[in-house]
Image (spheres, rainbow, N blue to C red):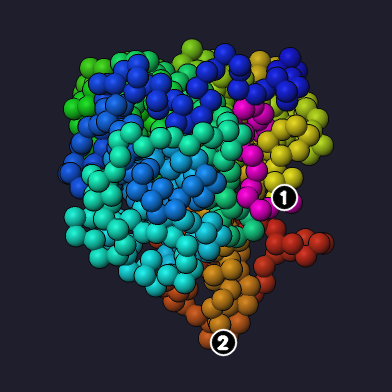
């Protein structure tokens, strides 16, 4: 690593010259500075597709809805659950900013959770309010005993459960006062998969969220006239943290796609005048699959300046195609991105000017994830478990430090200590670093499967599979997927004769897990490979692949 990048943690806080140090501070500043600029292009459940809302209107609507939340008893430190997807992006952002005006803690809830998962998260967070789309009404009714303190706001013209979001918004006070909130108070809880199986709540403070926004400006290449487009689900750290805060701090337009379709996404880029887009590797794979090289070359985007990619491992062949067909073919800057939820999604990136060098040095593990952090406030290193820099070319763990790092996992001090140690935030991702600071991602130390950019806990899948009476033990491992990067495979030992079928186990999981967590392949073997400590050796399972079936 570059040792000159190591500084005391005290120097890695939000700089004093940053005046707006909480999320509502930033919104107020932009609503005063550029009141008529479009803050958001997104779909609305109440008003239709591709709605636009200015910074002034966003502040006014947030104040209106905050008065309704306050009337429902929401106050400083209370948790608010936002159970909305990108099809209701306008309402999600209004709810988000309304909560912050009261000093409440926002939690964007995974709209793909099944009832078991949602029940766990709601019981853990004990929300005082939940803002939800109509399709979640039935499950919330069934979980009423889990959320005894929550007031429900349904985003619908004809609500069947709780209070009408529309009526609460339209009847609210546009001048409802803000509750002062400290910059070190929690702003958001982001639920993420962990090796223990159940989702962990990553707590980000207001100053961490603001720092993330400042870092995103450099990453996405944002300026006053920028339109940053993304289809990241609101419940992800990218959706409710990086994207939202980057455009808010920059005072530019965030354009949220309700879903992803190759042709529609490209058309939106033209229609919205997009200047930058985070086309994760999965999406670029789909573009390469569904369009010919000639069709890709024929695409024209008058305002597009930068394309970010990343979010999962990639082959050298894929990286070369991205460089040749997207970077060179479209005449745009390319940025390879690395970050993770615990770092506030602020990490490192491969700058446009470093791509030619990185392509020349590229080996079997693909292109470097970068040699620059999101901002001068963030440091990166490749360290051993004791916090020491590894030798050049040796494998270590990617570590980050800076003002965007999480406060910790809520109510999990031991897990927090496993990640925040020696003054760094450990990623669990293995990498090497060369003499010029280029970091190359090698593999993952954590038992997380990354499917299409979404993190999946192998322990959670294993727990569900082993609840089946016909299963004695099971291991969930990643398997290659040409589009998604990784998919879920389960290797199991049967407890019955005859054993259950693969289809039966997949159906079992479908009833108990979000769709993207359901294994796509189930294989049976006589015994799982174990080491001397009786731990399953998952690398053996991954290496053998289909030979085990």
* Residue appearing at x 44%, y 31% in the figure: 24
Residue 44 in view: yes
Between 424 and 96, the one lying in front of the other is 96
Q: Is residue 117 above or below residue 180?
A: below
Between 25 and 540, the one lying in front of the other is 25
Left/right placement of residue 286 relative to residue 52 reads: right
Residue that numbered label 1 is attached to: 413
Q: Quadrant of the N terminus?
A: top right
Left/right placement of residue 384 relative to residue 179 reads: right
> Which dot marks residue 497?
2
Q: Which residues are magenta?
A: 398-414
* Residue appearing at x 46%, y 16% in the figure: 352
- Residue 414: where, in percent of width, then height? 74, 51
- Residue farthest bottom in this picture: 497
Residue 291 in view: no
- Residue 470: where, in percent of width, then height? 55, 81
- Residue 494: where, in percent of width, then height? 59, 78
- Residue 142: where, in percent of width, then height? 39, 72
Is residue 456 shown in magenta? no
Lower position in the chain sequence, tag 2 or tag 1: 1
> Which dot marks residue 252?
none
* Residue appearing at x 56%, y 82% in the figure: 469
């Amino acid at each position: 690593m570059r040792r000159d990048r190591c500084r005391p943690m005290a120097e890695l806080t939000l700089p004093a010259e940053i005046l707006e140090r909480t999320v509502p501070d930033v919104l107020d500043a932009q609503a005063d500075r550029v009141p008529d600029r479009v803050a958001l292009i997104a779909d609305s459940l109440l008003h239709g597709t591709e709605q636009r809302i200015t910074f002034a209107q966003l502040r006014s609507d947030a104040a209106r809805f905050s008065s309704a939340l306050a009337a429902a008893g929401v106050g400083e430190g209370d948790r608010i659950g936002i159970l909305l997807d990108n099809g209701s992006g306008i309402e999600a952002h209004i709810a988000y900013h309304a909560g912050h005006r009261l000093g409440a803690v926002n939690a964007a809830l995974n709209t793909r959770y099944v009832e078991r998962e949602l029940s766990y998260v709601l019981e853990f967070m004990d929300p005082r309010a939940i803002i939800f789309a109509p399709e979640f009404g039935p499950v919330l009714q069934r979980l009423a005993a889990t959320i005894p303190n929550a007031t429900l706001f349904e985003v619908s013209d004809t609500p069947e459960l709780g209070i009408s979001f529309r009526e609460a918004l339209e009847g609210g006070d546009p001048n409802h006062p803000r509750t002062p909130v400290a910059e070190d108070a929690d702003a958001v809880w982001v639920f993420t998969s962990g090796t223990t199986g159940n989702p962990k709540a990553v707590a980000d403070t207001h100053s961490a969220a603001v720092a993330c926004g400042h870092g995103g400006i450099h990453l996405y290449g944002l300026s006053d006239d920028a339109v940053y487009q993304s289809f990241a689900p609101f419940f992800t750290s990218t959706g409710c943290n990086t994207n939202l805060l980057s455009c808010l701090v920059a005072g530019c337009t965030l354009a949220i796609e309700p879903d992803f379709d190759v042709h529609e996404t490209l058309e939106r880029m033209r229609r919205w005048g997009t200047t930058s887009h985070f086309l994760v590797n999965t999406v670029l794979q789909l573009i390469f699959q569904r369009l010919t090289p000639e069709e890709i070359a024929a695409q024209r985007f008058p305002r597009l300046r930068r394309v970010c990619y990343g979010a999962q491992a990639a082959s050298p062949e894929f990286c070369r195609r991205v460089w040749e067909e997207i970077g060179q073919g479209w005449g745009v800057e390319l940025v390879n991105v690395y970050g993770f939820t615990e770092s506030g999604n602020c990490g490192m990136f491969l700058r446009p000017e470093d791509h030619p060098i990185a392509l020349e040095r590229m080996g079997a593990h693909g292109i470097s994830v970068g040699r620059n952090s999101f901002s001068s406030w963030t440091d990166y290193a490749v360290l051993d478990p004791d916090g020491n820099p590894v030798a050049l070319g040796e494998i270590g763990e990617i570590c980050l430090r800076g003002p965007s790092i999480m406060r910790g996992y809520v109510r999990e001090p031991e897990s927090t200590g496993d990640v925040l140690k020696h003054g760094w935030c450990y990623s669990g991702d293995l990498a090497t670093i060369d003499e010029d600071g280029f970091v190359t991602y090698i593999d993952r130390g954590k038992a997380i499967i990354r499917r299409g950019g979404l993190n999946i806990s192998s322990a959670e899948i294993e727990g569900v599979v082993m609840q089946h009476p016909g299963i004695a033990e099971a291991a969930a491992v990643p398997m290659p997927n040409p589009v998604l990067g990784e998919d879920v495979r389960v290797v199991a030992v049967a407890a019955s004769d005859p054993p259950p079928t693969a289809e039966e186990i997949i159906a079992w999981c479908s009833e108990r897990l979000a769709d993207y967590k359901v294994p796509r392949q189930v294989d049976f073997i006589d015994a799982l490979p174990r080491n001397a400590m009786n731990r399953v050796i998952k690398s053996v399972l991954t290496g053998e692949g289909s030979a085990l079936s």
